[in-house]
Amino acid sequence: MNTKNSKSFVDDFMAYAKSKDPGQPEFHQAVHEVVESLADYLLDNPRYLHAKILERLIEPERIIQFRVPWTDDRGNININRGFRVEMNSAIGPYKGGLRFHPTVNQSILKFLAFEQVLKNSLTSLPMGGGKGGSDFDPKNKSDNEVMRFCQSFMTELSRHIGQYTDVPAGDIGVGGREIGFLFGQYKRLRNEFTGVLTGKGVEWGGSLIRPEATGYGAVYFAEEMMKTRGESFKGKTVAISGSGNVAQFACEKVLELGGKVVTLSDSSGSIHDPDGIDTEKLSYVMELKNAHRGRIKEYAEKYGVPYLKGQRPWSIKCDVALPCATENEINLEEAKTLITNGCFVVAEGANMPSNEEAVHLFLATKILYGPGKAANAGGVAVSGLEMTQNSMRLAWSREEVDTKLHSIMKNIHEMCVKYGSESSDFTNYVKGANIGGFVKVANSMMAQGLV
Ligand code: NDP
């Protein structure tokens, strides 16, 4: 095996992965990126090959799929599909979010769970990897409908999770409201108040800074990358996609650090505010999206700025791009446009927002490119800190949690540099994050025998 060159190693492995799970393109995309950057390292360290660590890593320890029946406000019966992918528990209980979105399927959840394993390892906290969710669409549903759905979903999920087993959190379509309904139903069914979910409200076991953590963390990571070139956010023009949890708090932190955010988006289109989204406008976005569940188009109408219907924001000139919406939202053409326009930093708040060709271009042009599993690890890191606080039955202050988050993001950056540094002035953060995340999980799997 170790005599093969890395290209044929990657090709052989991908042929194996695809033959096992045909029809899972997102999962293959995520595996391919990891295997590509691990190949040389594995060929130099054949003990991992002999132990078939890679083959074991892409095989979920368990996948649960279940029926979620619920009634809407008119009394109609609806049937959705629920999932939990318990990917890897070598370094801790399964940990990863729940996504409620009509596109949810096994391929998407396996890609997210696979990424989560390496991401959680990078945080240095004891968390394995998992992901779950449903093809349920919370859009245009009443609070009561969302509650009935969450209660039905948790009625089955509660059999499979627990504070020492599997601790879900939020993701797309699952915010504070949904976590509340899910937690309430778990507590009722099990008659216990435990840290079984993270992202809880602060009055009932949540951690301060958890809502902010992914967005803040992505900006802290971008800041660390920029420091390596003597740069900072001060005076930089920043394009952000999305307008949900991650995008909102990424925007907040960029403003704090002196940057100018000129775009936000949702699945219907993008706004371009050349004067910059200030704190007052950001408060409006938070109110619009979180309280009224409105559309970003309304921002353009209120402030009289251009609305790019059906478009992503990457045609807008910027120094820094923070994709914070969803997977595969930067393709090769968009990556080229960003670079031509002078963008030199891409830090991914979302999971796998850049497609493979875009990633290759970012690496080839040697811009500062921070992949999601490193750049957006702040969310799960603070979820880990929420678990710690729940176990200790005490709560840390905002400053304490933010300081810990900041230092975790700096450590992740250092880990990426350690494994991904290719010359005195270039770090391949993809390689760094993948090897850095892999080593701890792989060694733990080796130590625990063939399980
Ligand atoms: P939210 O549901 O709060 O927001 C998602 C945002 O992305 C919305 O603006 C939504 O627009 C947009 N969006 C969703 N799907 C699409 C699509 N198919 N095309 C275009 N836009 C889309 O989710 P989060 O902010 O929590 O998550 C955003 C990303 O960050 C995801 O990739 C998630 O996996 C990742 N992430 C989140 C973490 C967290 O702590 N929340 C942690 C780590 C990663 P619309 O309202 O129109 O649907």
Image (cartoon, grey):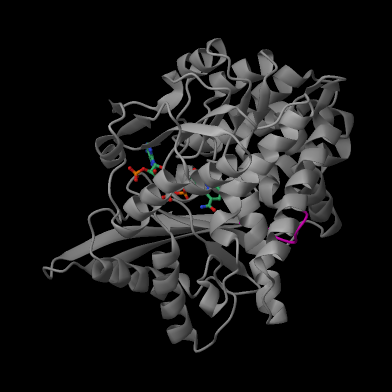
Quadrant occupied by the N terminus? top right
Q: Residue at x 87, y 40 (%)?
A: 47
Q: Is residue 288 left or right of residue 157?
A: left
Q: Position of residue 137 (x, y in %)?
A: 30, 53
The single residue placed furthest to the top in the displayed view is: 340
Q: Which residues fall within the magenta stretch? A: 124-129
Q: Position of residue 272 (x, y in %)?
A: 38, 28
Q: Position of residue 422 (x, y in %)?
A: 83, 21
Q: Is residue 277 left or right of residue 357?
A: left
Compared to 397, does 49 lie above or below?
above
The single residue placed furthest to the bottom in the displayed view is: 191
Quick check: can you spot residue 87?
no
Which of 149/87 is in front?
149
Quick check: can you spot residue 398?
yes
Quadrant occupied by the C terminus? bottom right
Which of 22/71 is in front?
71
Q: Residue at x 82, y 55 (%)?
A: 444
Q: Is residue 106 left or right of residue 86?
A: left
417 falls in the magenta region:
no
Q: Residue at x 32, y 65 (%)?
A: 68
Q: Quadrant of residue 114?
A: top right
Compared to 140, does 337 lie above or below?
above
Q: Quadrant of residue 133?
A: bottom left
The single residue placed furthest to the left in the displayed view is: 74
Compared to 103, does 23 lie above or below?
above
Magenta stretch: dominant secondary structure: loop
Q: How many marks?
A: 0
Q: Position of residue 112 (x, y in %)?
A: 54, 46
Q: Residue at x 60, y 15 (%)?
A: 361
